[in-house]
Structure formats: structure tokens, C-alpha cells
Image: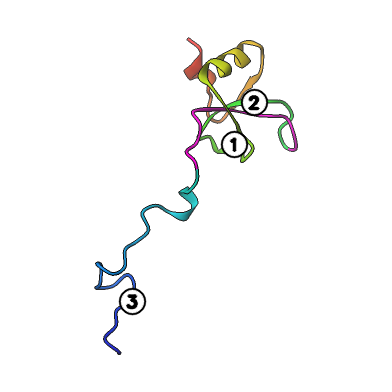
Amino acid sequence: MSGRTSCWCRSSTRCRPPSSPPWKTGPPAPAWGIADAGIGIPAPEIHQGDCWAGGPTLRPISAEQARAELAEGVQACEVCRPDTVLTP
């Protein structure tokens, strides 16, 4: 062996693990969002921002907008159930 250490071995001052996983980079998820109707989504749905069912096209909205959309009859996601949090 040549005496050099690999990245995750003994030389922690030279090489450090990443601060966050690569799939967690980017802007933070919004608190609430709406997924517009499209392929796989028959009607618009309100989601919590971190819901996996919202998909990558989740459009950020405020809590007030989400409440208004739910009051107008927009469907709540059956996975994250934002209606249980937003409505009294």
C-alpha cells in the first residue's frame, strides 16, 4: 500500500462527507401546494408541501389559498390529508 488514505478513512481533516445528501439539494418544499389536473391527476388536488403524491409540478400556495380552494370544492390529497390540518 502506498501510505495514502482514501477519502472516508483516516484523514478526516482532508476529506469530509457531504453536508446533505445530493437528492436533498434545491429549494425547500412549500408548506402547501396544488397539483393541477394532468396526466395521472384527474382533477386539481391540494397537498402538504412535502407530500410525495404531489409530484414535481406542485405549485406553491399559501395556507389561506389552500383553505379557499378546499372551500370551493377542490379535492384534498388522500395521502397527506391537508383538509384535516387546514379546516377546523
Residue 85, position as x, y percentages in the image:
47, 19
**At label 2, which amino acid type do we have?**
Glu
Where residue 73 sits in the image (x, y, percent)?
A: 66, 14
* Residue kind at label 3, given as amino acid type: Ser
Q: Which residues are magenta?
A: 27-39
Q: Are marks 1 and 2 in contact (CB under 8 Å)?
A: yes
Res 53 label: 1
Q: Along the line of sight, which residue is nearer the eye, 71 or 5?
A: 5
Q: CA distance from mark 1 to mark 2?
A: 10 Å
Q: Give the alpha-carbon distance from disc 2 to disc 3, as whole Å.
A: 49 Å
Crowding at dot 3, Cα within 10 Å, few <14 / some 14-19 / many 20+, comes out as few
Q: Residue at x 72, y 26 (%)?
A: 43
Q: Residue furthest bottom?
A: 1
Q: Quadrant of the N terminus?
A: bottom left
Residue 6: mark: 3
Please tell me which residue is depicted at 24% across the width and 73% down the height of the picture. 10
**Residue 45: mark:** 2
Looking at the image, do the residues carrying marks 3 and 1 touch, with CB atoms under 8 Å apart? no
x%, y% of residue 59?
A: 61, 31
Q: Is residue 36 magenta?
A: yes
Q: Residue at x 56, y 14 (%)?
A: 67
**Image quarter for residue 41?**
top right
In front: label 3 or label 1: 3
Q: Nearer the viewer, residue 62 or 39?
A: 62
